[in-house]
Amino acid sequence: MRRSFIIGLALVATACGPPVVTYDRPPTTSTRPSTTSTTAPDVPTTIPDEPSTADPDDTQWAYQEWSVLSDVDPYDAVWGDPGMMVLGYSRLGFDDSPMANGLWLFDGETWSGTMLSEVTIPDEYGFTPDVTDLVWFGGRYLAFLMGDTTTTPGRASMLTSSDGLNWDLEYLGSALAAALPAGLYATPESPPWPGSSAATQASIHGNEITVAGWAVLGGPGEGSVSVPVIWRSTDGRTWSTTALPNANFDNEWASDVSIGPLGYLVEVAGPVHQSASFWYSPDGEDWTYIGDRFDAESRMLVSMAVGEGALLALMMDLENDTQPTSLWRSTNGLDWEEVEPPFRLEPPPDGYPAASLANSRKGLVAIVATSGGNDLWRTIDGLTWVALPSISLPNGEPPGRLTLAVASSTGNHLSLTTAAPGMVARWTEAAETRDVVLVSYDDVLNVRSSAGVANEIVATLSPATTGVVLTGRASAAGSSIWVEIITNEGTGWVNGYYLSVQDSAANPFSETIGVDLIGELAAVFAGRGDLTELGSRRGIFVAHHDRAKAFKSLDGLLTDPTLHMWAGTGCSAEECPDETPKRTFAKGVADSFLSAWNDDDRLISVDNVIPGGNGMLVESIVPTEFANLHFVAVKDPGDHPEYGGTDWFTWYVYFTYEDGVPVVLGMSIDQWAP
C-alpha cells in the first residue's frame, strides 16, 4: 500500500464559506484515439517498459506453506484462484496404510476434502479411478482420471471444479473413431471400436492445454489393444483428439507430454517400447517418431520440457551404472544431440533420479535433488546454464525432495512444491508486473492474440488494472514495442506504451524522493531549462481541466512559443474554444506550478490528494490515466483577502520509473470551480 502523508499546515477537507458545489465531470482523458480501435496509433519504440533482459540468476522466491490434515499423504498440488488444491491419500488408521484418495482445498483458513469415491464411477471391479494429473486451467481445477468411468466408450474423463468444493465429471472429447488410423484392426474379430480411454499427463503453454493418454481398440476382452492419443483444448471444455500415427500399435499409451514455443513432445510406453519412445510435432497436428534420434531404446525418460530456445530430454541410461543420466537437446524437435549438463544425477535409494525439467518465463529450468537439498539451474538454449538462488524453509534448512517441481499452469511462472505428511510448501518465482497507464476512464486496453493492432482482440484491461504479469517476451510491431502478458483467458499481447513501472526495488519511491524531484522540477521550470532528464521518454501528459494533452518533445518545451488552449473549470476547450485562454506551456503550466511552489503557505502531499472547497470530488481528483502512479501534490491554499480563499489551486505531478529511475509522466490541476 502506498504511504500517505501531508507536509505543511493542517489540512481542512472542506473550506469554510458557501455550500460546496463540485464540478461533476468525468476524470480527464487522453487525446489519443480509443484503444478499442483496430487502427490505434503506433508509438515510439523508446519506451521503458520492455521486460527485463537481466541474467536469470536474479530470481526472487516467494514462500508459502500450508499445514495439511494429519491423515493425508499429499502427492500432487496445484495453486488456483480458490486456493491450494492437494491430491493425496487419506490414512484411515488401518496399519497406517493408504486407504483412499481424494482432493483437499485450502482456502487460506480451512481444509475441505472430497473423496474421489464420492464423485467418480467405480470400474467393473469396484475400484475408484486414480487421478493421474491435477492442473488449474481456464478458471477451473482439472483432475484427469485413470480408468474407465463411464459406459460410454471412447472418452477420457476428468473431474472439474471452479471452487474446489463441488466437482463435476466431464469428458475430453467425443468418440475417438474419427481420430484413429483408417482401417486399423478392421477385421470381424477386432473391429475398429474405441473402447475405454484414459488421460495420463497434461501440459500447458499459454492458452492451450494438451493431455496425453490412450484409447482401447478392438472391444473389451482378448484381442483389444491400446493406442496412444492426445487431446488438445484452449478452454478446457472443448477438445480435439489425435491418435499418434504409428503403424505398429501394440498396447502402447502416451504417458507424458510437454508443449512450448517450439512444439510438442510426447512420450509413449508399452510392450514394444519398454524404454523411451518419442513423437514430435511442431503444431500438434503433424507427428514424427523421433525415438531413434537419440538412442532411446536403452534409456528411460526422466523429464522433458519445450522452451523458446531448445527442447530438452533428461534420460536415465538403463545400461550405465556409472553415469546414469544424460541430457539431450534439440532446436527443431527432429535433430537431437547429447550435451553435458552442469549437474550430475546419482540414483537415489529408490533407483530413480530425483530431477525434473520445467518451462519458466525466463527459460528452461532443471530441478535436481541432492543430499543437501535441491540444485536449481536455468538455461535458454540448453548449452549455457546459470545457477538459480537456492530455496530454503523459513528456519534456513533446505526442503526435502521437490517431487512436485512443475511450471505453474497460470502462465509459465515456476512453482516449486514439496509435499510430505502434514505439510505442503511452495516457492514461486516472483513475477515481473506492470500497471496500466494513460487509458481514460471510459476506455480499455486491448489484449491481442499477437503483437500489432491488426490481430484479434482476446481480452481487455480496465484503465486502473494493476499487477499485469509479463511472460518475458516482447515484439516490435510497426514503431511500437508489444509485450506478452498473462490474463484470466490465457496469454496475449498489449502495447507496452500503456504499461508502467510504479516502483523500483533498489530505489523505491518515498517522501524524500518525491519532494526532491518536485524541487528539481521547479528549478527547471524557473530557469526555462531542459525537461528531457526529468521527463518520461513518452513525454509529459497534462490534464488541465480537460483531456490530457501529450507533450512528447521535451527538449525546448519551456521556450517553445507555441500557444495551447488551457481549459478552465467550467468548460472544456472543445466545448468552449472561444472562451479558452491560449498560453505557452511555460505560461500555462510551469508558471502556474511555480506560483503554488513559491507560496509561503504551500502544502505538499505525497501519494495523498489535497481536496479543496468547490473543487473536484475526492475520487475524481487524480485522472484515471494516472491512477496507478505515485504523485506529489503542491497546493496554494488561496490567501488573497479579496477572494476569501477561493483562489486556491493544487498541482499534481505523477511519476513512473524508467531504467530504475523515477521520471515525470503526467501533471494535473484542481481548483475552486464556480
Image (cartoon, rainbow, N blue to C red):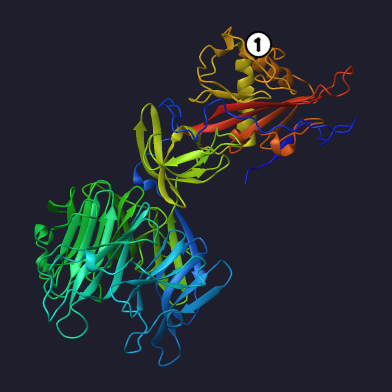
Along the horizontal axis of the image, is 482 left or right of 355? right
Residue 157 on image: x %, y %: 35, 72
Task: Residue at 65% x, 35% y: name it.
Answer: 511
Q: Is residue 465 depicted above or below 178 in this figure?
A: above
Task: Residue at 42% x, 93% y: name it.
Answer: 94
Which of 429 and 44 lies nearest the eye of the viewer? 44
Residue 421 on image: x %, y %: 44, 77
Q: Is residue 315 depicted above or below 559 in this figure?
A: below
Which of 297 and 617 lies nearest the eye of the viewer? 617
Q: Which residue is mark 1?
A: 583
Which of 634 and 323 lies nearest the eye of the viewer? 634
Name which residue type carries label 1: Arg
Residue 30 on image: x %, y %: 57, 28
Q: Do we see residue 589 in this rendering?
A: yes
Q: Residue furthest front?
A: 188
In terms of secondary structure, where does tag 1 sit? strand
Residue 544 on image: x %, y %: 66, 23
Q: Residue furthest top?
A: 561
